[in-house]
Amino acid sequence: MTFLVSCANGAGTSLMMKLTLEKVIKRNNIQCSKVHHCSLSEGKGQAKMFDVTLCPLAFIKEFNQAIEAGKIVIGLKNPISDKEMEERLKENGII
């Protein structure tokens, strides 16, 4: 499984999301071959190449093409909350 995490600028929040996601992946023994973090502009174009995209809830509409392509896109109220991230991954059948 491959994961993309994206935020506005691709620096602070997405890096923290990546670190949080890696912790959740490890804790739940999720088979993962790649976790990539990037800016919103880069992520919109790349999301279709990943199984799952995570982003702040405010940006979820930016990933409509990935959703239409059958990819999982998860918006998070608190992007660095491992508890929320884990809950959303469970809701989407990833855990």
Image: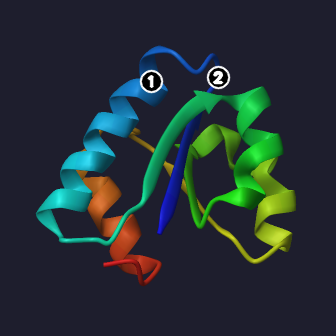
On residue 37, which mark appears? none
* Residue at screen point 59% across, 67% down: 51
Q: Nearer the viewer, residue 71 or 81?
A: 71
* Residue at screen point 19% across, 48% down: 23
Residue ranking furthest to the front: 33
On residue 8, which mark appears? 2
Residue 20 falls left or right of residue 27: right
Label 1 crowding class (10 Å Cα cut-off): few <14, some 14-19, many 20+? many
Circles 2, 1 touching at the beta carbon (< 8 Å): yes
Residue 33 falls left or right of residue 54: left
On residue 13, which mark appears? 1
Residue 33: image x %, image y %? Answer: 42, 60
Q: How many marks?
A: 2
Mark 1 lies on a secondary structure that is helix
* Residue at screen point 51% across, 61% down: 2
Give the Cα distance between marks 2 and 1.
8 Å
